[in-house]
Amino acid sequence: MTAQPPARVVIAPSILAADSGRLREEVASVTEAGADWLHFDIMDGHFVPNISFGPQVLAALRPHSALPFDVHLMITPTDPFVAAFAEAGADHILIHPEAGPHPHRTLQLIRSLGKKAGVVLNPGTPIESIAWLLDLADIILVMSVNPGFGGQKFLSSQLPKIAVLRRMIDGAARPVALAVDGGITPETATDVLAAGADTLIAGTAVFAAPDRSAAISALRGAATGAALRSDATDPSPES
């Protein structure tokens, strides 16, 4: 079933796709272009096959944008580094259930530091892993690629997972953002918004665009296509 798309889509450019030699200017560029959040992919070479950056980069960029810093920890162990990212300027800290033995405790730790807590589901992570964590989650992030590298192709197999999570969130009766990351373009954004997402993490779709304001507008505008799809799948009222 097609979900009703959100009234306004949250766009979070991922700085993994930015020019790493000009991060201050890149952050200013997408901030001015209309981004809602800034997304940081933190990779350790263990949990995922790549290494990105640590809390020092967040701390260096924090004075240059008032946008929320959305921090995705692809590291193990996770708990010893949560406080450092919180202190560096993270507003949201997202973890993988597989990254430590006690994800419930990790989410409690994040919230105790005054930050929003999130849970990330890899393509192969079962939906059941979120069932007993939803009460502590402010954000659920569905990976529509296998994490570790930018620029990958969107996995349409994740659309049913998004739809199920949408129903779970609606049943929770509390605000939880449902984000999708991986292969997001205006075309795939229509699919994920129609499935029930409300937040789009986009890397190359924004940072590789010659006009970043237009790129962000195009992603946000995908909600229109999702709404048309929703209207088309709704049963017609009886006459």
Image (spheres, rainbow, N blue to C red):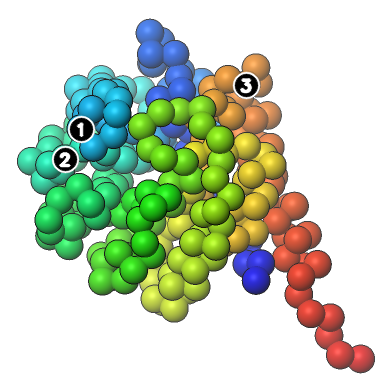
Residue at coordinates 27% horizontally, 23% vertically from top-left? 51
Q: Nearer the viewer, mark 1 or mark 2?
A: 1
The numbered mark at residue 76 is 2
Q: Is residue 134 left or right of residue 179?
A: left
Residue at coordinates 45% horizontally, 19% vertically from top-left? 18
Front residue of 63/75: it is 75
Q: Secondary structure at mark 3?
A: loop
Q: Report the residue that reaches farthest toward the right.
A: 239
Residue 65 vs 234, above or below: the answer is: above
Q: Which residue is mark 1?
A: 46
**CB atoms at circles 2 and 3 under 8 Å apart?**
no
Q: Nearer the viewer, mark 2 or mark 3?
A: 2
**Residue neighbourhood size for the residue with mark 3, other residues' Cα within 10 Å, grouped as few (<14), some (14–19), many (≥20):** few
Q: Report the residue that reaches farthest toward the top.
A: 21
Q: Is residue 194 left or right of residue 146?
A: right
**Circle 3: residue type:** Ala
Q: Quadrant of the C terminus?
A: bottom right
Q: Marks 1 and 2, Cα distance to the nearest angstrom?
A: 7 Å
Q: Report the residue that reaches farthest toward the bottom.
A: 239
**Residue neighbourhood size for the residue with mark 2, other residues' Cα within 10 Å, grouped as few (<14), some (14–19), many (≥20):** some
**Circle 2: residue type:** Thr
Whole-percent x and y of residue 77? 12, 42
Q: Secondary structure at mark 2?
A: loop
Q: Is residue 90 visible?
A: no
Front residue of 25/132: it is 132
**Circle 1: residue type:** His
Residue 190 vs 210, above or below: the answer is: below
Q: Which residue is mark 3?
A: 209
Residue at coordinates 37% horizontally, 49% vertically from top-left? 122
Q: Is residue 167 visible?
A: yes
**CB atoms at circles 1 and 2 under 8 Å apart?**
yes
Q: Report the residue that reaches farthest toward the left.
A: 80
